[in-house]
Image (tube, grey):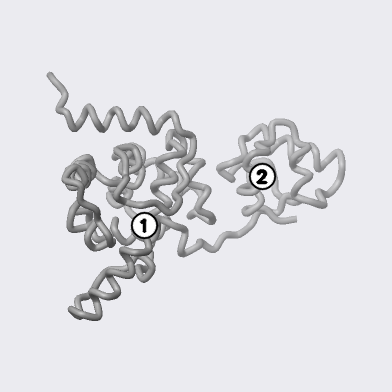
Amino acid sequence: MVESEEQIKIDSLKNIAAKNDTIAIYPFNPNFITDFKGYTLGMSVAEIDRLHSFRDENKYVNSAKEFQNVTNVSGSLLIRISPYFKFPAWTQNREKNSFKKTNTFVVKSESIKVVYKDLNTTTAEELQQINGIGEKLSARIIKFRDRLGGFLVDDQLFDVYGLKKEVVNKTLIQFKVISKPEIVKINVNTASAAELSKLIYLQKHVAESIVNYRNLNGSINSLNELLKIEDFPAERINRITLYLSL
């Protein structure tokens, strides 16, 4: 079965994205969005193509509203990406003058409030709106969240197995931890190995090593002491200590 041109294009963009560990978003002129840039912002192939067709006519969009009219992106996506739009100063002056003469409302990127969805209450279906997240990954995110008892910080999304960094970066354009769960911290000096291993970040043998370290050296006085434990996941110390107390 021959793949459609659109699917080939999507696969190509995914391959390019896979080679980039992180994708930071900086202010940009939306008139010059490339296929790859559009993909990372969450635009569909059709929306990107509409913009390119418009630009092929040597035309420019000069406001967030005009960008939406040309590309037909959803209002929710516009709200999330338009704060990063950077238009030439003269276009913004022209909009102000046009507003005075016609009393027509112009959507200004500076005045658009970014509204995030809560990572702790979002559904699998909502997560699937992100390019790169399908049924399997969205279910895995929800399962990971449930095992944690809820996300405490946005960066915990990077800990979901199989979720690529560039997909996490795109997700965090639209989702944030808003309602933090109330958790009971585990006392690292009194907890058993079984209790410590309930923390998703600590494997059983690491939990046992913590107890052995404690038995040999006495009470742990600083959570940074955990870095001395063999096989302790040092790269996640900042996440792990959110759940521990002395």
In the picture, the disc for residue 85 is 1
Is 158 located above or below residue 174 in the figure? above
**Mark 1 vs mark 2: in front:** 1
The number of numbered badges drawn on the structure is 2
- Upstream in the sequence, badge 1 or badge 2? 1
Q: Toward the viewer: 221 or 40?
A: 40
Local secondary structure at mark 1? loop
Left or right of 184 on screen, residue 60: left
Left or right of 218 on screen, residue 9: left
Identify the residue at horizontal 24%, vertical 61% (top origin): 75
Identify the residue at horizontal 25%, vertical 71% (top origin): 106
The residue pinned by badge 2 equals 237
Left or right of 233 on screen, residue 25: left
Give the position of the C terminus as an image quadrant. Answer: bottom right
Local secondary structure at mark 2? helix
Three-letter amino acid code of the residue under disc 1: Phe
Give the position of the N terminus as an image quadrant. Answer: top left
Q: Toward the viewer: 46 or 3?
A: 46
Where is residue 143 drawn, in percent x and y? 41, 45
Q: CA distance from mark 1 to mark 2?
A: 36 Å
Name the residue at the top extreme.
1
In the picture, the disc for residue 151 is none
